[in-house]
Amino acid sequence: MATVFAFVNFLVFCMTAQSAPRPEVIDLGYGLDDKTQFWPGTQRFNVTLELRVKNKSGIPWLAMNTFETSDHIGTHVDAPFHFNEKGWKIGEIPLHRFMVRGVLIDVSNKVKGNNDFVLEREDIKEWESQHGIIPDESIVLFRFGWSSRYYDNRTAYFGFGNSNSSIMNYPSLSKDAAKYIVECGNVFGVGVDTPSLDPGKVVSGEAHQTLLGAQIFGIENLNLENDALPATGFMLHVLPMKITHGTGAPCRVIAFLGHRVRRL
Ligand SMILES: *[C@@H]1O[C@H](CO)[C@@H](O)[C@H](O)[C@H]1NC(C)=O
Ligand SMILES: *[C@@H]1O[C@H](CO)[C@@H](O)[C@H](O)[C@H]1NC(C)=O
Ligand SMILES: *[C@@H]1O[C@H](CO)[C@@H](O)[C@H](O)[C@H]1NC(C)=O
Ligand SMILES: *[C@@H]1O[C@H](CO)[C@@H](O)[C@H](O)[C@H]1NC(C)=O
Ligand SMILES: [Zn+2]
């Protein structure tokens, strides 16, 4: 009898396991094409259709492309080496740092489209008072509500001045906010839905220097339009193209919702 019960329990276990919902997957990156945002003055993403052959040598169809690009293009990882001479290049960042839990600090209701907004330490502490401290070995994402401008209007996305296009203005992190992330002790990466870890008007890259100086990688031009992404309780896979000596690399960023957050 006990054996029968054990067997029934086993069946119930199997059925439950099978009917468990598939984790929801959210793409947090943009595609690479001729609309891809590029840093002013750097090589934009440029595809040449190299080969299009129909029905030749017994091959019905054959296609190949060539592309050239800055290593900081579209949704991309900033390797520590970008601002830290002794920092990791893309190929040197330990792989496990790209597959960890994520948290989302959403300040879009404070930004309200204001190009001058700068995120401060207090904004992070306020989030922590509601959601708990930033977990160890995590990637911290910041939503400024900037993604809606990504495809629309390059002038609006970068906040270019009307008379002088070398002046930019969009929100991001203050140096002190970056310092706070470093002080957290063991954050692996920081991502933003704007062109840079530093606000557009900060030309000395203070947040970059602070974060990358501590071997914390950056993710820029994230697509954070999807409202389904919660504040906590999701996993991230950040997969930069494995450019061995890259100072940065275009990447896929994927959030996994609805399954137990665990250490990989
Ligand atoms: C794109 O690449 C092609 C082929 O190398 C080149 O002729 C063209 O000028 C490039 N365009 C841009 C915008 O970089
Ligand atoms: C492909 O090429 C062969 C040889 O030239 C020809 O006989 C055949 O009709 C072609 N097929 C198509 C689908 O064009
Ligand atoms: C793009 O944004 C700028 C700055 O917000 C604005 O002045 C301009 O009219 C916009 N252009 C288009 C085509 O929407
Ligand atoms: C544009 O801004 C840059 C950086 O502040 C400055 O060096 C340059 O002189 C300005 N150009 C014009 C035409 O105002
Ligand atoms: Zn970058």
Image: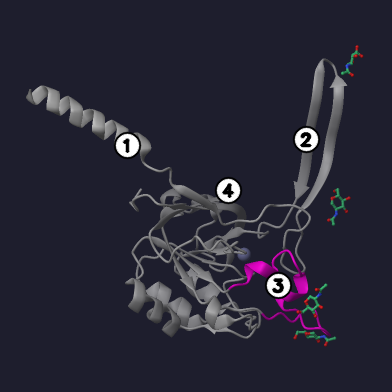
Q: What's the amino acid at mark 3? A: Tyr
The residue labelled by disc 3 is 157
Q: What's the amino acid at mark 1? A: Ala
Seen at 11% across and 23% down, the residue is 3
Count residues near mark 3 (Cα–Cα under 10 Å), then give few for <14, some for 14-19, many for 20+.
many
- Residue 246 visible? The answer is no
Q: Work out how far the residue at label 1 is from the one at label 3, CA to CA, in angstroms.
A: 45 Å
Label located before the other in sequence (2 or 1): 1
The quadrant of the rendered image in which ligand 3 is seen is bottom right
Count residues near mark 1 (Cα–Cα under 10 Å), then give few for <14, some for 14-19, many for 20+.
few
Image location (x, y in percent) of residue 151: 73, 63
Q: Work out how far the residue at label 2 is from the one at label 1, CA to CA, in angstroms.
A: 43 Å
Seen at 46% across and 71% down, the residue is 105
Seen at 77% across and 83% down, the residue is 161
The residue labelled by disc 2 is 64
From the viewer's perspective, is the residue at label 2 or at label 1 nearer? 1
Secondary structure mostly seen in the magenta stretch:
loop
The residue labelled by disc 4 is 244
Residue 175: image tag: none
Query: Of all residues shown, which one is farthest toward the left?
Result: 1
Query: Element type at marker 4?
Result: loop
Q: Work out how far the residue at label 3 is from the one at label 4, CA to CA, in angstroms.
A: 30 Å
The color scheme shown is: one colour
The residue labelled by disc 1 is 17
Does the closest atom of ligand 3 sit within 8 Å of the Cβ of label 3? no
Check contact, mark 2 vs mark 1: CB within 8 A.
Answer: no
Count residues near mark 4 (Cα–Cα under 10 Å), then give few for <14, some for 14-19, many for 20+.
few
Label located before the other in sequence (4 or 2): 2
